[in-house]
Image (cartoon, rainbow, N blue to C red):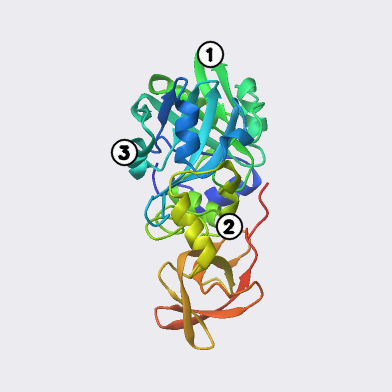
Amino acid sequence: MPLQYPQGTLAEHLACRTDAVVFDVSHLGTVRLEGSQAFSQLQFAFTNDLKKIAPGRAQYTHLLDTHDASVLDDIIVWWVSEEVFDVMPNASNTDQVIAAIGGQDITSSRAVLAIQGPAALARISTFFPAASKVGKFKVAKCDWNGIECTVAGTGYTGEQGIEIAIPNAHASALWAAILQSGVQPAGLGARDTLRLEAGLALHGHELGASISSLQANLEWVVSWSKGEFRGSAALAAEKDRGVSRILRGIATQGRRPPRAECAVLMNDEIIGRVTSGNYSPILEHGIALAFVHPTTAVGDFVTIDVRGTPLSGQIVNLPFIQKK
């Protein structure tokens, strides 16, 4: 997937918010676990509780470091059938995830195409009706022209849509059919601005080494009631003592975008740093995610130091735009 296609990032972003786009996310990993022990392996490895869902559903979850509860990866689990799970890690973390949970790396055998936007399901229904009926966070096996695909109602844009895993040999044909239906291709640039508007964390920025689920303001993905899980002792210790920083959203004035690593100040004192920042095509001003002092609250006014130039901002609720 390129940074952008000829129409450019801004056009791709707006197309996703108003119509539909397709991302080729085949670079992401897929680790398959099968058999009678697969459920228990994943239930212990991840923070969320698989008992909250069932076969035919998907779940967002975290894999933690056992020593300091850092988020080694944030993951979507597709519960494909009773004893079959497809675990979807970030591309660079696939080997690390396999080391923690086992399973088989099937990344190279399939492509994954993510169709996102308010018109996504309507456009898909014109040539792949079964896929268009897969609901939010549902998972189903669907036949397209005699080819078995795995379809999930998941995405990374804040819009409705689906992700289709298809055997490699048939991926080009599916891509062509998607484009023929009127869906535009979109690249990494739009994927990043879309997820930022939706307030979604990116591993390596809002999650990663020395960053816990609690610091990232994602405690909802931690199921304390299910009992022990990988990293639970370290995470519980952090919860008891309180986090040293918390992830917040910042809306800035004007079109100039805040950038990662810029200092965040309040009353001329540094209280944190930006992890992701950009111009919001929908809001038409800058937005940022930043780790700041845990006492920082929604409504507080801050300043972001952008290469020596102060940029006024305010702590706001996430997401920046409502998820669909």
Q: Is residue 225 above or below residue 199?
A: above
Q: Earlier in the sequence, mark 2 or mark 1?
A: 1
CA separation, marks 3 and 2?
30 Å
Residue at which label 3 appears: 95
Q: Image quarter for residue 155?
A: top right
Q: Report x, y in % for residue 255.
A: 55, 71
Q: Earlier in the sequence, mark 3 or mark 2?
A: 3
The amino acid type, in three-letter code, at marker 3 is Asp
Task: Using a 10 Å C-alpha cutoff, classify the residue at mark 2 as few (fewer than 14 neighbours), some (14 to 19) or many (20 or more).
Answer: many
The amino acid type, in three-letter code, at marker 2 is Glu
Q: Is residue 183 visible?
A: no
Task: Using a 10 Å C-alpha cutoff, classify the residue at mark 3 as few (fewer than 14 neighbours), some (14 to 19) or many (20 or more).
Answer: some
What's the residue at 66%, 75% (across, down)?
A: 299
The amino acid type, in three-letter code, at marker 1 is Asn
Q: Secondary structure at mark 1?
A: loop
Q: Earlier in the sequence, mark 1 or mark 3?
A: 3
- Side of 211 where 220 appears, left or right: right
What's the residue at 66%, 38% (across, down)?
A: 119
Mark drawn on residue 19: none
**Eye-nearest disc, 1 or 3:** 3
Q: Is residue 158 above or below residue 134?
A: below
162 or 213: nearer the viewer: 213
Q: Report x, y in % for residue 247.
A: 53, 64
Mark drawn on residue 145: 1
- Side of 261 where 163 appears, left or right: right
CA separation, marks 2 and 1?
36 Å
Q: Is residue 274 above or below residue 29?
A: below
**Eye-nearest disc, 2 or 1:** 2
CA separation, marks 1 and 3?
33 Å
Residue at which label 2 appears: 197
